[in-house]
Image (cartoon, helix red, strand yellow):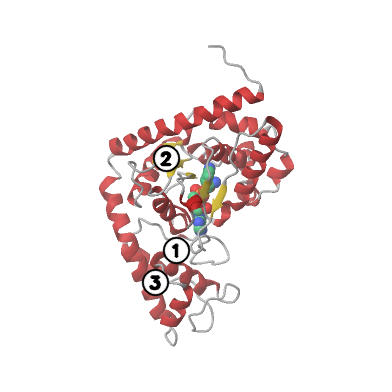
């Protein structure tokens, strides 16, 4: 590493509080955040304003916010090393989204893959917030002037839009925003459903056996992995086209254990799917046991979770105010005191 890349950067990323975190959220996102918190100035948000773009129950949203923070901390995010914050409690995200939206062509939002997917799923409850979602996400990132945004592959298009909006703002009003770089991990960036490896692992998968939750009990993890869909043929070999199920399990094993895919192929040469699945299950159970234990220990301690959000929120607000005071002045808004 050269001196430049070792410099402390500003890292920002977020997840929606829509229930339990699954293995995709963990491997594509939170696991890497923990590593970054040791080296950089980090802001990790729970984005409750994004969560109201689809039908929801307010009391459940509140419960999910606590749950999300408890899971972040159980995964190893230490509030002494990073700033955990709740999006709706920080002044500025919505205002910046409005300003950025005024420079964002509607067609660009209508072309977003995630919007098209969600719009198809929520045809009866399609609201403008869902269309505007990526602009709010751009504001989440730009308000902290983040250098790096660690995300799973599904968020890549949203980061591209963010860069585009930042560039537009900078060229119209003068240099203001850093153009953020996505950080997408080499393994774990796209974990697929265990039951339909054509679609990504997701909280909204109707087949509950397709999704591994990080707080699932060991027996449940084992059962889901042993019943994962595999492919005809009995060879443990990485091939995303003709062996989607096995390749997904190999990705999971590789991301959890750090073993390269080739080493996994070598280890299971001549062995069957049964042996391989048992080994994947052992790896998952071993990696997630401490997360589950910690989650059980802290999830009902509301004071601890609120303290973490309050402390991180103060640092986040300070940085957000700094950006917003520049932005407001540049776009021609006035302050009278
Ligand atoms: P969300 O809440 O859907 O997911 C949180 C993180 O988990 C990653 N992820 C996955 N990674 C690998 N395989 C999967 N199957 C998988 N499913 C989810 C996501 O890429 C994400 O990194 N729009 C965002 C939340 C957001 C945000 C932001 C992120 C709002 N503002 C600003 C970064 C920066 C979302 O819905 O993530």
Q: Give the percent coordinates (x, y) of residue 161.
A: 65, 45
Q: Pointer 3: what residue?
A: 280
Residue 2 against residue 176 in the figure, above or below:
below
Dot 2 surroundings within 10 Å: few (below 14), some, or many (20 or more)? few
Tell me the mark number nearer the camera, choosing from 2 and 3: 3
Cα separation, mark 2 vs mark 3, equals: 33 Å
Q: Nearer the viewer, residue 46 or 145?
A: 145
* Labelled pair 1, 3 in contact (Cβ < 8 Å): no
- Rendered image quadrant of residue 22: bottom left
Cα separation, mark 1 vs mark 3, equals: 16 Å
Q: Pointer 2: what residue?
A: 60
Q: Which sits earlier in the primary sequence, circle 1 or circle 3?
A: 1
User: Is label 1 in a helix, a strand or a loop?
Assistant: helix
Q: Which sits earlier in the primary sequence, circle 2 or circle 3?
A: 2
The dot on residue 118 is none
What's the residue at 50%, 31% (across, down)? 320
Q: Residue furthest top?
A: 337
Q: Give the percent coordinates (x, y) of residue 39.
A: 40, 49
Tell me the mark number nearer the camera, choosing from 1 and 3: 3
What's the residue at 63%, 44% (across, down)? 163
Q: Is residue 168 visible?
A: yes
Q: Nearer the viewer, residue 118 or 70?
A: 70
Cα separation, mark 2 vs mark 1, equals: 23 Å
Residue 268 against residue 9 in the figure, above or below:
below
Residue 266 against residue 221 in the figure, above or below:
below
* Labelled pair 2, 1 in contact (Cβ < 8 Å): no
Q: Would you say the beta carbon of the disc 1 residue lies within 8 angstroms of ligand 1?
A: no
Q: Pointer 1: what residue?
A: 209
Dot 3 surroundings within 10 Å: few (below 14), some, or many (20 or more)? many
What's the residue at 71%, 44% (across, down)? 108
Q: Give the percent coordinates (x, y) of residue 233.
A: 53, 84
Q: Which sits earlier in the primary sequence, circle 2 or circle 1?
A: 2
């Amino acid at each position: 590493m050269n001196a430049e890349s070792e410099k402390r950067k500003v890292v920002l990323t977020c997840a929606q509080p829509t229930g339990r975190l699954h293995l995709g959220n963990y491997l594509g996102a939170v696991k890497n955040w923990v590593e970054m918190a040791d080296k950089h100035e980090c802001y990790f948000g729970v984005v409750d304003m994004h969560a109201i773009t689809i039908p929801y129950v307010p009391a459940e949203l509140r419960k999910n916010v606590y749950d999300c923070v408890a899971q972040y901390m159980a995964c190893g995010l230490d509030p002494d090393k990073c700033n955990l914050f709740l999006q709706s409690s920080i002044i500025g995200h919505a205002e910046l989204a409005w300003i950025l939206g005024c420079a964002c062509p509607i067609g660009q939002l209508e072309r977003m893959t995630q919007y098209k997917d969600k719009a198809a799923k929520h045809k009866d409850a399609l609201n403008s917030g869902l269309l505007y979602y990526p602009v709010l996400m751009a504001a989440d990132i730009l308000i902290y002037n983040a250098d790096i945004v660690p995300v799973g592959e599904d968020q890549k298009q949203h980061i591209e839009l963010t860069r585009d909006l930042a560039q537009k703002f900078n060229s119209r009003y003068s240099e203001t925003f850093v153009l953020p770089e996505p950080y997408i991990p080499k393994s774990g960036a796209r974990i697929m459903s265990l039951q339909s490896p054509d679609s990504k692992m997701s909280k909204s998968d109707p087949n509950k056996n397709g999704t591994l939750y990080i707080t699932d009990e060991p027996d449940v993890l084992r059962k889901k992995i042993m019943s994962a869909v595999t492919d005809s043929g009995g060879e443990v070999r990485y091939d995303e086209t003709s062996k989607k199920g096995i390749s997904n399990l190999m990705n999971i094993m590789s991301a959890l254990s750090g073993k390269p895919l080739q080493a996994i192929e070598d280890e299971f040469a001549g062995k069957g799917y049964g042996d391989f699945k048992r080994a994947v299950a052992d790896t998952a159970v071993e990696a997630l046991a401490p997360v589950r234990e910690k989650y059980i220990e802290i999830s009902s301690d509301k004071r601890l979770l609120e303290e973490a959000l309050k402390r991180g929120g103060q640092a986040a607000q300070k940085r957000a105010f700094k950006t917003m005071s520049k932005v407001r002045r540049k776009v021609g808004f006035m302050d009278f005191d």
